[in-house]
Amino acid sequence: MRTVVCKNSREMSEKAAKMIESQVILAPSCVLGLPTGETPVETYRLLSEACEKGEVDFSGVKTYNLDEYYPMSPENAHSYRYFMEQNLFSRVNVKKENTHVLNGEAEDPDAECAAFEEMIEKDGGIDLQVLGIGENGHIGFNEPGASLYARTHLTTLTQSTRNANSRFFGSVSEVPERALTMGIGTVLKSKKILILASGAKKHKAVRRLLSGEVDTDYPATLLNLHSDVTLICDEAAFSSERIGVDIGGTNVKLCVLNDANETVFKTAVKTPGGSREDLLKLICGKCLEIMKERNIDAVGVGTPGIIENGLVTAVNLPFYKTDLCKEIGDALGLPVRVSNDASCAALAEKTCGAAKGFDNAVLLSLGTGVGGGLILGGRLYEGRGSAGEAGHFVLRAGGRKCACGKRGCFEQYASAGALARAAKKEAQKAPQSVLARLILENGGKAGGEIIKKAADAGCPSALAAIDAYSRSLALGIDGLAALLDPDVFVLSGGVSLLGDALINSVKKHIKCGLPVKRALLGNDAGAVGAALLQ
Ligand code: F6R
């Protein structure tokens, strides 16, 4: 299928009109199959304009319309005959006797349909069949479940189509329950097919069509069996976006990425303190709000904690063996992927941050805890679900007790707490130092910001604290380098805000000689990476 994506519906209409004009110019006595509906209105106007200017001549053209309500008088303003007269036939020089719209008043609808088919055959078949597409994938009035072989027939409309078309009537109850329509078999016999689709509400139908599948429950997909189909649609109908959710103990961050992996929207809300239900309700509510406005195809979720067989257990969140994919997926009706938050950050840095262009990268997130994400062979490596938990390999046998129950975990020597301990130790050694003064002013707390401030002022104690901390961090990095031999290490999280002072010090202490970089995406990495999960 040839696909032409236009900026907007105006451009779609212009391109469609040009294609129909070319057909008529190249074959002045061709047979056109035509749709009604909102989509082709502007195309018909442009064709009328071209005809008025003498750029195209419809005098030899024959037309067959796709469908008509049943029962329906041709004089009724809701009839498709009336629509065609208003929008095209009365405005171009097509001969009335060459225009064919099924008779919605036919006493014998079956005979009417058979005669319609016969006329198309007698005229040599349809050269160019123009189509719109229904939100449920209908073509003409071929509703889900349509037969591949069906020819023109009387059909019963689905509630979804009646609802969609009620915008042309006073209310849905006024929309006829039945219609006469060319069958899929009739449409597929056309020599060429042109499908038009515009607006976000056609996105799902366009995506199904482009998936290449053939499914009678989505009649438009049957067009994939035809060898000469052109789809002209606008960006709103074509482009798809993904939501990324980064669940943190303090905030839930959400972002939307477009096809080019650009962040087109982001927001954050406070993480509610209550139950799992409260947290999931908030996440799903926010996603549904976004989905009202945008063509969202999938959702990715990054969460702290352990993921085993898809079940999430996180100490700081109300998740215990929680199936986030299922719970969120069922509520949103979309595919949902879940991964560890540091894995998401690694994926984000690999795709559009500090590890871009590298096939093998290790991200270490240095904060309250130490997390890690692995990119191996260009892809996120998750093992059975929790690979990259760098914080919990043992760096020092019998070392400091860790919250996980073991002793000497890397986290104990590379977390923000470890940095704070190193800073306090240096401050004690030099009570007159800038570092010591700043810690005192901060109520005795040695936060990263304070250490950075002192280091930026050239305070030797702050630099010594960073140096001591970096020694342990470098030890861990060397261990990981021996195991994984990555192209690059990326440092993220609160401690990485120390910037060059940290990076230079780590580089000095590592033995592996591999590049160590600071993460570029900051606080957005988790949500961006979640949206990138596949
Ligand atoms: C109309 C027709 C329908 C429409 C479809 C889209 O003759 O056959 O299949 O093409 O319902 O309608 P709009 O363009 O109004 O969105």
Image (cartoon, helix red, strand yellow):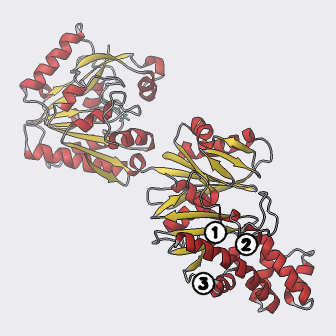
Q: Is residue 474 above or below residue 132?
A: below
Q: Position of residue 238 (x, y in %)?
A: 39, 48
Instruction: Looking at the image, tell me whether mark 3 or mark 1 is earlier in sequence order.
Output: 1
- Outermost residue toward the top in this view: 107
Q: Which residue is mark 3?
A: 511
Q: Residues within 10 Å of mark 3 (few under 14, many from 20)?
A: some
Q: Is mark 3 within 8 Å of ligand 1?
A: no
Q: Is residue 375 left or right of residue 219?
A: right
Q: Residue at x 24, y 24 (%)?
A: 183
Task: Say the numbered circle drawn on residue 180.
Answer: none
Q: Which residue is mark 1?
A: 364
> Whole-Å distance between the Cαs marked 3 and 1?
17 Å
> Which amino acid type is shown beneath numbered disc 2?
Ala
Q: Residue at x 55, y 67 (%)?
A: 349
- Outermost residue toward the front in this view: 397
Q: Nearer the viewer, mark 3 or mark 1?
A: 3
Q: Position of residue 228 (x, y in %)?
A: 18, 42
Q: Are marks 2 and 1 in contact (CB under 8 Å)?
A: yes
Q: How many marks?
A: 3
> Which amino acid type is shown beneath numbered disc 1?
Leu
Is label 1 in a helix, a strand or a loop?
Answer: strand
Q: Which residue is mark 2?
A: 414
Q: Is residue 196 left or right of residue 412?
A: left
Q: Nearer the viewer, mark 2 or mark 3?
A: 3
Q: Is residue 377 above or below residue 43?
A: below
